[in-house]
Image (cartoon, rainbow, N blue to C red):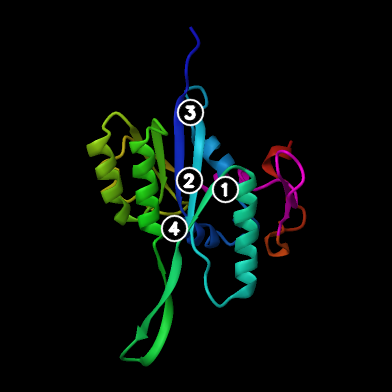
Amino acid sequence: MEHVKKRAAIYIDGFNLYHSVKELGFNHLMWCDFWRLGEMILPSQGESLVKAVFFTAFYPGDFGKSVRHRAFNDALGLRGVEVVLGNYIKVPACETCSPGKTRPSEKETDINLALHLFNDARHDRFDHAYLLSADSDQAATARLLKQEFPEKKLTTVSPPNRNFSHSILHFADHKIALKESHIERAVFKGPIVLAPSGGKAIRRPFEYDPPAGWVHPDDRP
């Protein structure tokens, strides 16, 4: 009798991961294939990745950053990653030191992640959820998932150089600590990302070009 693999889904807190990868200091690591990253952390013999969802928002007022962000989102889409957008609103910067001034504040990303993960569980779209976030706010998501769907597994995944959220760990079945090597192995190969059926192609922004002499881990001896 053929063994049926469990269905795995990964939910990625974009800003939590972005700041972690940015602190590694290598811009080419930003050009990361999240579908491949998800596949890399699965137990290959027992699970198959059926869904990857990336939660993010466009930072306002920086045209260059928006162009890169859109290219990245489009590249992920070609790989089958679902991109769910939040937004930014203006909030007071500091009433004491800068009265009347505002700053952008990201909204909806956390709640989007929680709602999508729970809705996918409700519709039985996965057997095992991988929650890539160290944000303790997602402990409520983990708690409700295990409360309502105790048969479904949950793995908490920490971004590189980030501690696990102990609040999420309390409800998780397993944990995985991402390292720089995971991100590097998942970097898109080459400057062009092609649609599987041909036609559409996304070019890597030059800001994400790897340093001279860098060789993708797949191509190293």
Q: Which of these two is toward me, 206 or 146?
A: 146
The residue carrying mark 4 is: 16
CA gap, disc 1 and disc 3: 17 Å
Whether residue 166 is visible here, answered yes or no, is no
Q: Describe the element under mark 2 as helix, strand or loop.
A: loop
- Disc 2 residue type? Leu
Query: Do residues under tags 1 and 2 come within 8 Å of each other at their CB atoms?
Result: yes
Identify which residue, 22 or 37, lies in the foreground.
37
Query: Does the residue at mark 1 contact the one at mark 4 (Cβ under 8 Å)?
Result: no
Using the numbered discs, state the Cα–Cα distance from disc 1 to disc 4 in whole angstroms: 14 Å
Nearest to N terminus: mark 3 or mark 2: 3
| Residue behind mark 1 | 183
Question: Which amino acid type corresponds to the residue marked 1 in the rendered image?
Answer: Ile
Sequence-first tag of 1 and 3: 3
Which is more foreground, mark 3 or mark 2?
3
Q: Which residue is mark 2?
A: 178
Disc 3 secondary structure class: loop
Q: Magenta stretch?
A: 179-204
Residue at which label 3 appears: 43
Alpha-carbon span between mark 3 and mark 4: 24 Å
Lower position in the chain sequence, tag 1 or tag 2: 2
